[in-house]
Image (tube, grey):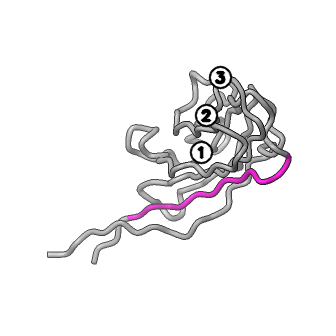
Amino acid sequence: MADVKIKHGSATSLTISGLNSLASGSNATSNEINVTTNDPLDVLVELTIDPGTTTGNKQAVVFAVSTLDGTNYSDGTNNDNMRLLGTVSLPDTNIVRSAAMSVAAAFGGTLPPRFKVVVLNDSGTSFNSSGNSAQYVEVAAEVA
């Protein structure tokens, strides 16, 4: 009998325009991730955030927006219409790397064919002008 094992792809940089210097209360949206070629079971997203001196809620909230047709995305300006991937606690001025966040879990276990990651700065201050980034890894099943 064959064993099925989880196989993680290589980490891929994810461009999120405006993540550096993102003002508190504002969103920044990534480039599209298209999973129709490799057909992974999941995509794990990780953020690195350099928050500056935080106040208030001291967090970044991470969402995903999706499309079935490659053109019309769910509303990325209304938090109620986005899928929550997770939050990143930003307790002080140190650079923080988030835990991996599952995109499939946010969509009920099934990846949409195309999606974007949206970061809401809820830290009480603008992110620093450099040092903020994101990456993702595709997760597949492999029969061994």
Q: Say if the magenta span includes residue 138.
A: yes
Q: Which of marks 1 and 2 is nearer the N terminus?
A: 2
* 3 vs 1, front mark: 3
Q: Which residue is drawn at 44% across and 46% down?
A: 104
Name the image quarter holding the C terminus.
bottom left
Q: Which residue is drawn at 34% across and 71% down?
A: 142
Taking 69 as reference, is 133 above or below it?
A: below
Name the image quarter holding the N terminus.
bottom left
- Badge 1 element: strand
- The region drawn magenta spans 129-140
Which residue lies under the disc numbered 3?
A: 78
Q: How many marks?
A: 3
Which residue lies under the disc numbered 2?
A: 61
Q: In this view, does 63 lie to the left or right of 56?
A: left
Which residue lies under the disc numbered 1?
A: 115
Q: In this view, does 12 lie to the left or right of 131?
A: left
Q: Nearer the viewer, residue 84 or 58?
A: 58
Q: Say if the magenta span includes residue 63.
A: no
Q: Residue at x 45, y 60 (%)?
A: 40
Q: Residue at x 30, y 69 (%)?
A: 5
Magenta portion: prevailing SS class: strand
Q: Position of residue 107 (x, y in %)?
A: 45, 38
Q: Which of marks 3 and 2 is nearer the N terminus?
A: 2
Q: Three-letter amino acid code at disc 1?
A: Phe
Number of residues whose C-alpha sits closer than 10 Å to that of mark 2, classed few (under 14), some (14–19) or many (20 or more): some
